[in-house]
Amino acid sequence: MQEKWLLAGLSVALLLGTCSALYEDQIKKFDWRGVNVGALKQSRVDLNHFQPRILVSTHEGVVASLCVKTGELVWRQVLEQKPRGDIKLLQVSGFSDDSSETAAAPMGSNLGFDMLTVQGHAPALVRGWNTNMGALEWEWSIMPINTERAQDALWIYSKSVLYHVLPAWRSHLEVTAYFASSGHSTGSTSKVIAPWITQESCTLSGTFYVCTEGKQLISLDLVSKSGQVIRTSLETEPKGKTQALMGLNGVVIVDGKPISVNKDQSICGGLQSSSYAVGSFNYRKILAYADLSSGILRINALYLDNCAPAADLEQSLVFPEHFGTPSLNNFDCKQKRNGEGKNCMFLFSTTSESIVAVQQGRVRWSREEALANVIDSQFVDLPLADSEGTLENEMKGKAGDFTSFERDIASAFLRRITTQAVQIRSLFLHVIGLGPPPTDTQRAGLVRDSFGLHKMLVLLTRAGKIFGIDNVSGKHHWQLYLSNVIGFANDEQMRLIVQRSAKHFPLQPLCTILGKNAVNGNGVLYRFNPITGKVAEGGLVQLDYKIKQLSLLGETENDFVKGILLLDASNKVHVYPEHATPLADGMYLYTADVKSAELAGYFVKYAGGQLSSTHIWNARLGGHNSEQQIIGVAGKNPIEHVHSQGRVLGDRSVLYKYINPNLVAFVTQAPDSTHKSVLNLYLVDVVSGSVVFTMTHRKVRAPLSIVHSENWLAYSYFNEKLRRTEITTIELYEGKTQANSSVWSSLQAPPMPLVERQSYILPTIVEALRETITERGITNKHVLIGTASGSIVEMPWHLLDPRRPIASTTQGREEGAIPYIPELPLPTESHINYNQTVARLRNIYTAPSGLESTCLVVATGLDLFVTRVAPSKTFDLLKEDFDYILISIVLVALTSGSLIVKHLASRKLLKQAWK
Amino acid sequence: MYSKAKFVLIFLLGVVASCWGFLEHDSWITVELQHSLAANSESFSFRGNVTIPSLNSGLANVEQPALSIVDLDLLKKLALGNEFYRLKATVVYSNGAKAQFITSNKACRLLQAQLNDVLWVSLDPSGYVTGITVSQDTAPATVECTQEDVNKLVEKQFSTDVLIRHAELAPVPDTAGFIQKVEREREARERGEVRDNRGFFAKYWMYIVPVVLLVFISGATNQDGAK
C-alpha cells in the first residue's frame, strides 16, 4: 500500500522533473543565435536618407534592412516559405527606374509606400512596408486564373503603376496594370503578340521585354502605347543569358557588355565587365562596374551622360578568396560633411553567398549568408594546451618497447624527471618572456577545457562554404570556400566527415568533405584541419569515378586516420587514403534508390591486395509498380553507446533491448486509391538484408521527421484525415532472454524482435527530430523536436514511451511508465531556445561533450542556434550558484566546534573524577 | 529425383496477438530458388521451388531435389573459405509479374545446420514481397568452419521452412479509449464508488500521527511532573 503511494509520488516527481527550464540569469550564458537573411537577390543602398540603410531582398524570401556601418540587421521580415514567399520584385520609393519621383501619393496617406514587394505567383502578394521599422502597412493580392503559367510571371513598376507581365511562351504577352498601392486594375489586360518569346532567351529590363534571337535583340516597350517592335543587331551571337541592368530602362547586359534597346537611353560603348550597377554621384547618373582578377577587385565608374570616367570612385582592393566571385549589386554615395569628396559604399553579392560591403578601398563589413543553408555539422574537439600536450606525449610513451620491468621503472622515472625539468624550464622562460611563442590556436583561445564543452563547430553549407565557429562565443575562426562542388545525386547533400579526432596529439585533427564535381559529376574529396581551417594532406582531390555510397572504416594503427570506403557507380569499392585499404575487409555497404525504393547490400572483401565487392542482398520497398518512394532513411548514430541492456519490468524481470546497430528505418510514401496516401515503415537490417518489421499508416503523408536510436524509433507525420501532426514511437525488445550479450551478429540475429508501438498527437508542426547523445549513454535520452514556429522542445523519452499503459495498472506504474494520454504536452519550460526563435528551422545536430550529463546542440535553418542541454540535469557538476563560502564556514565551524567540545568534555570528565 | 514434398505449417511469432497483419486480398506466389556455389561467381544453379498458395495462411509447398556430390563438394569448399552462400529467389505473382531477390548467408552456417534453413518472406501491406532472407535457426558452435566441421555434414537434402512476415497496421492515437477512461473515472467519482482499498493506516495516518505524537509529548511532560 505504502509502495503505491511512493510510486504515485515518484511519478509526480518524474513529471515535475521534466519541467526543467532555464533561469533568467542563465539566458545567453551558454547559448547564442546567429541571424541570417540568405543569399542576396536585390538590394538598395541608401546613404542619403535621414537614417542611412541598406534594404535587401534575398533568395530565402526575406526582406531586411541592414545597418550601413556594421552590416547588422536593423529589422528582418521572414516571408512565407517558397514558392509563396519567393520575392519577385523589390521596389523602394524614390528609386524608380525611369527617374519619376514615384509613389506620387501625399505623405501620410496610406496610398504611398516606402518599399513595395511582390512575392509568389498563386496568389501573388503585393505588400507595402515601412522601411524604418519593417512593419507591414498594406497588402493586396491577385489570384491568377492559370496558376501554372503564372509561375513565369514578371512584375515591373513604373510611375505608381505595377505591371503584371504574363508570358505565354512562343505566343504572346499579357500585360495588366494595377495601381501599386491599392491593387485596382487600371483597365483591361492588353495582349501583345510576340511569337518569338521563349523562357531561355528573354529578360525584362525596366519596361522593355528583351529577347535574343540569333545575332539580334528583339524588344518591346510594354508600357508605350505604340507597341513597336525594336530590333537591335549584335556583333556576335550571345553565349550566355542576357541580364537586365537594374536602374536603367531598356539596358541589358549581353556577355558582359551593356547594350541599350531604348532609344531614349544611351549607354557608353566599349565596356566589358562581369557586373554593373547604376547609381548617382554629384547629381549625375553613374555606371559602376567591378571585376575580380587574380585576387584583386577593381571598381571603376563612368558618368552616363558623357562617358567620362569618374576617377573619384575608382578603387581596387585585395579580395579574400573565401568570398568567391563577387558581383556588384548596388551602390550609393554620400557627400562628406566637410564638403570635400564623396564617400561611396559598394554592395556585392558573391558566389559563396556572402554580402560584402566595400568602402574606401577596403572591405567595410561582410555577412556570411551561406550559413542560412547549413547541410552538415560536426563538433570537433579542440587541441590540448601546448604544455599539456607535451606531457600527454610523454605519458603515452612507448611502454611496449621495454622487456624488463626494472628498466621500465628506471626509464619511466627518468622520463618523468626530464618532463618536469622541461616544464619548469618552459615556465621559467615564459615568465622572463623568452619562451617559444604560443601557437595561433593557443592565442585564439582554442584550447580544450576540462569538461570538453568548448569545441570547434565545423559547418558545411550548401554553397560550398565551410565555417569553423567557436561553439561558446560564436566567433568565426576560419572560412573556406569550395567552388564547383555540389551535392550528390539521389537528393544527397555533401558530407562532412571527421577522419581523425584531436585525441592523437601531436597529430592534427583531420576533416574531409565529400561532394560531386559540378562539371563532370565525379567525386571530390577535400581534406583540411578543422581547428585552423588550413588545407591538409593534399587538400582537394578529384576522383575519377562517381561516388554512390560511402562509409567510414576503423582507425589505422600508424596515423589514426579513419579511412573512407567509397562505392562507385559501377559497384567497385575504393578506400581513401589507400594505406587503410586492409581495414575494409569484411565491411558491408548498402545503397537505397530514392525513386524506385530498391535497396541493395554489398560485402567488401580484401584479398591479395585487391578490394572486391559482392552483391549479397536486395530488397524492394517500391510495391508492385514502384509507386512507393523513399522519403526518409534513419540509421543510428555510430558513436552511440547503449548503457542499459534491458528494461526492468514491474515484476522485477528484465526485458532485453533489441540493440541492432545495423538496423536502418526506411519510410516510403505513395498515393493510394482507397486510402488517399499510404506511408510504410520498414526496419531493415542492412547487413543481412532482412526486413525485420513492416508497418503501414493509412491516410497519412509527409512532412516526415524521423529519429532512430538505441532500441527505439520515433517519427512524426501529417494525418490527412484528422489534419494534425502525429508521432509514432516504436521500441524493439529481444524478449526475456538475450541471444548473445557480448557480440552482435546480424547474420545470427534473433529473427523477430518484440515490437512495442504507440501513437501520440503532437500539437505543433514538426520540422526536425533529433535525440540527445552523451559520452557513455548513461544519461536519459530526450528527443529534441524542432517546430515550424522555430522553437526547439525537449521531450523526455518517458512521455514518448510506447509502453505507457492505457489502463492505469499497477504493473505499468511499478515500471515507471506514465499513464497514456493521447496528446503530448509541450510546456513552455521545455522550449530550450526560450524566445530565441530559429527562423525556418530545418535540422538539429547533437554531439556529446566531455561531461556525461551534457549534450551539445546546434539547430540550423535560416538562423543558427547553439546551446547545450542536460537531459538528466547536470548531475556531475556543482551548480553555478553553489555556495562555497557557506560550506567552508560550516565545515570550519563544525571542526572547531567538535574540537572545543572535546576539550570541554575532557575537562568535565576530569572534574567529575575529582568529585 | 528424390524430391520430397514437405508441408510446413507456420506459426508466426507475434508480439501482440491482436496485431496480426492480414491482406485484404489474399493471393498466391511461387518462388524459384537458385543458388551460387562458387565465390564471386554470377552463375546460379537451380535449387528448388516454393509455392505459397495463400499468403494469409502462410502454408508453403517446398520442392527441392537433393544436392549432387559435385555440388556438395562446392558447398564444402565455400564453407572452408568462409564465403557467402548466395541464393537468388525469383518471385512470380498471381498476375504474372516477376521480381528477383538475392539473399546470402555464410555457407559454413548452412553446413553446421545440416542444410536446414528458414526462408523469411517479408510482405508489404498490399501483399508484394519486399525481401527474402535465408537464415538458420540454430546458433553455430564456431564462426569459421574447419575441415572437421565440414566432414560432419551428412544431409544431402535441403529442408526449408518458409515463414511469412506480414506488414502490420500502425497504431493511431487512442483518443476514444482515453475519453472513455476519463468518463468512467468521472462517473465512478460522481457515484461515490471510488473503492478505497487502502489499509487503515494508509488511509488515516494523517490523523493518527498527531494523536500519537500528542500522547508521547504529554507522556513525557507527565514523567517530568511525576519526578
Image (spheres, coloured by chain):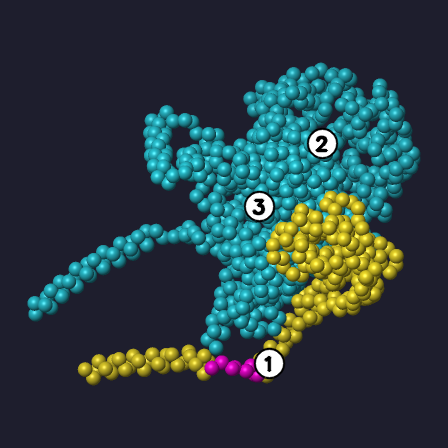
Chain colours: A cyan, B yellow
Q: For residue A466, say whether it is visible.
A: no
Disc count in the image?
3
* SS class, disc 1: helix
Answer with the quarter of the image where residue A113 lies: top right
Residue furthest left in the image:
A914
Residue range corresponding to the magenta coloring: B192-199
Residue receiving disc 2: A544
The quadrant in which the C terminus of chain A is found is bottom left
Badge 1 amino acid: Ala
Where does residue A459 sit, x and y in percent of width and height?
60, 39
Q: Chain of mark 2?
A: A
> Which of disc 3 and disc 2 is earlier in sequence?
2
* Prevailing SS of the magenta stretch: loop
* SS class, disc 2: loop
Residue receiving disc 3: A858
Do the residues bearing badges 2 and 3 touch, measured as CB atoms within 8 Å?
no
Examine the structure image and report whether residue B193 is included in the region drawn in magenta: yes
Tell me which residue sits at (82%, 56%) in the image: B32
Choose between A134 and A912: the one closer to the eye.
A912
Tell me which residue sits at (67%, 47%) in the image: B81
Residue receiving disc 1: B188
